[in-house]
Image (tube, rainbow, N blue to C red):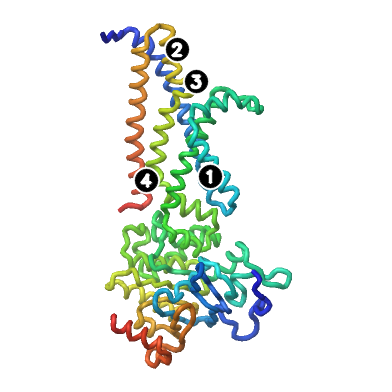
């Protein structure tokens, strides 16, 4: 019943590995967008402006409550009606970056809130400005507790990149679909895609845990 | 704020300007009045200790002076200038952030739980303010910090992070960190309350040294009556948001006039 063709495997492997590069690029690019934008979302909710806090809070809720796939379609297909004409890659990175920024902002928020109130007070007692209090005191301490969540979403964003195939980003899933359609064989390409995903996410998760421990020790937060 | 501000001078002038003045200061949390029309002057170089039952508002006095809490009415002056307010068109208005930062630079504070920055070494804690706020070079800041770490007996631990220091050691570093900003007024908020009994003396001896060495104005909240007696110029007994009684340590501790003071002191003595 299991009819695995080795020569076919060797034939399609280079193409899939090349597409895996695109997948990593999409995940990495989307993650950079998410990491930066997520911090903006998190800090915007901590400004004294109630209006800004409200608007960003609702935006984050909205993004988190609607499917990523819809957001991808919306930005790519509806965007042009608002003069937003984007390539599949740009639209994909923005959609996935925006989506994960909403989740990461919650992770940051948790991290920032985990910093004891006494740290803010000590910073004020030595007269640090608010910006420097964040940069020098709060964010460095908020980072280690946020790191686990940030790592989870890095793996999450990686696993969600196949959704970008729907707007024609040539990542792994897209390549596997094409190979399947061209050769009427789906077993090998899909299996290999699954294995490639595993081969990347498992070590990444492991490295992230190591990194978190090392960072805590380096910062003197653990003995 | 519909409060009549004309009773408050724009500046304190003349001889004998106090280093700190609380004028008619009220602080409320919801319906609870924590401080009720507090008037308190502290002279330059004076060591004033605040004692009283918990909830009497004594810590709030220090926190308002450090601008960790806002006040509801009244004015606080530091070194002759209003802290909580500033002059605008000949009137006092609420201080903006820039004014607060300017006046706050004269005040330093040590906390019950030390609040050292855990991701920085002892030295890092002490150079942070001088470099980031006062604009000192790293070399200048380190020189100043090492001198102060030496003063508090922590120079050999300068490269240790707080997680590797005992409570008493952390508190001594915290005192050095505050002094590195060269404040005119130092606030000590129950700085020995979180310490194990055997290390309390290493912190109190540092504070005792400051009384001798610096012309610092100090306000201290403590439960250690013996220590207060030994180093204070004046002790204020707080009761429900007001100064119930104040005087020299001998006067207040040995011959208290008010019944509440007597009750508090006998309760504290019994507990000890």
Q: Nearer the viewer, mark 3 or mark 4?
A: 3
Q: Earlier in the sequence, mark 4 or mark 1?
A: 1
Q: Nearer the viewer, mark 3 or mark 1?
A: 1
Badge 4 is on which residue?
A: A215
Badge 1 is on which residue?
A: A57
Say what secondary structure mark 3 lies in: helix
Decide if residue A1 is on the left or right side of residue B221.
left
Write down the quadrant of residue A176 in the picture.
top left
Chain where mark 3 sits: A
Residue nearest the viewer, comparing A190 with A18: A190
Q: Nearer the viewer, mark 3 or mark 2?
A: 3
Image mark for residue A166:
3
Do marks 4 and 2 share a chain? yes
Q: Nearer the viewer, mark 1 or mark 2?
A: 1
Mark 2 packing: few (<14 Cα in 10 Å), some, or many (20+)? Answer: some
Residue nearest the viewer, comparing A5 with B31: B31
Residue at figure coordinates x 58%, y 69% from the top left:
B103
Q: Earlier in the sequence, mark 1 or mark 2?
A: 1
Residue farthest along the front direction in this orientation = B31
Write down the quadrant of residue B264 in the picture.
bottom left
Residue at figure coordinates x 41%, y 45% from the top left:
A146
CB contact under 8 Å: marks 4 and 2: no
Rendered location of residue B260, percent (x, y)? 40, 86
Badge 2 is on which residue?
A: A178
Q: Earlier in the sequence, mark 3 or mark 4?
A: 3
Residue at figure coordinates x 48%, y 83% from the top left:
B243
């Amino acid at each position: 019943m299991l009819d695995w063709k080795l020569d076919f495997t060797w034939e399609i492997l280079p193409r899939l590995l090349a597409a895996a590069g695109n997948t990593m690029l999409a995940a990495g690019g989307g993650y950079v967008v998410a990491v930066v934008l997520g911090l903006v979302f998190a800090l915007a909710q901590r400004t004294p402006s109630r209006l800004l806090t409200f608007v960003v809070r609702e935006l984050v809720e909205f993004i988190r409550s609607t499917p990523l796939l819809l957001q991808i379609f919306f930005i790519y297909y509806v965007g042009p009606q608002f003069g937003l004409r984007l390539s599949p890659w740009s639209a994909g990175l923005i959609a996935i970056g925006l989506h994960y920024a909403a989740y990461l902002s919650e992770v940051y928020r948790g991290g920032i809130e985990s910093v004891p109130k006494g740290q803010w007070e000590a910073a004020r007692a030595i007269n640090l400005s608010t910006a420097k209090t964040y940069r020098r005191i709060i964010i460095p301490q908020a980072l280690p507790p946020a790191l686990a969540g940030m790592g989870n979403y890095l793996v999450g964003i990686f696993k969600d990149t196949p959704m970008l195939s729907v707007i024609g980003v040539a990542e792994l899933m897209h390549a596997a679909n094409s190979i399947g359609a061209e050769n009427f064989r789906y077993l090998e390409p899909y299996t290999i895609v699954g294995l490639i995903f595993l081969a990347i996410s498992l070590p990444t998760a492991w490295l992230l845990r190591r990194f978190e421990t090392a960072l805590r020790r380096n910062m003197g937060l653990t003995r | 704020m519909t409060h009549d501000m004309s009773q408050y001078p724009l500046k304190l002038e003349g001889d004998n300007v106090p280093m700190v003045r609380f004028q008619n200061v009220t602080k409320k949390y919801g319906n609870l009045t924590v401080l009720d029309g507090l008037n308190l002057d502290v002279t330059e170089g004076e060591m004033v200790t605040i004692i009283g039952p918990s909830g009497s508002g004594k810590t709030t006095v220090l926190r308002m002076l450090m601008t960790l809490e806002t006040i509801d009415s009244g004015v606080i002056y530091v070194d002759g200038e209003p802290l909580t307010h500033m002059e605008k068109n000949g009137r006092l208005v609420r201080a903006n952030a820039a004014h607060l930062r300017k006046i706050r630079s004269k005040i330093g504070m040590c906390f019950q739980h030390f609040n050292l920055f855990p991701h920085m070494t002892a030295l890092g804690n002490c150079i942070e303010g001088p470099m980031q706020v006062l604009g000192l070079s790293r070399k200048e800041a380190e020189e100043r910090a090492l001198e102060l770490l030496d003063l508090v007996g922590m120079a050999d631990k300068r490269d240790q992070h707080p997680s590797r220091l005992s409570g008493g050691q952390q508190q001594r570093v915290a005192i050095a960190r505050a002094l590195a900003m060269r404040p005119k007024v130092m606030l000590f908020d129950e700085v020995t309350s979180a310490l194990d009994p055997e290390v309390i003396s290493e912190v109190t001896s540092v504070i005792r040294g400051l009384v001798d060495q610096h012309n610092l104005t100090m306000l201290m909240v403590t439960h250690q009556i013996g220590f207060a007696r030994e180093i204070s110029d004046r002790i204020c007994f707080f009761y429900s948001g007001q100064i119930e009684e104040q005087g020299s340590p001998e006067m207040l501790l040995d011959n208290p006039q008010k019944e509440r003071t007597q009750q508090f002191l006998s309760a504290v003595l019994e507990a000890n």
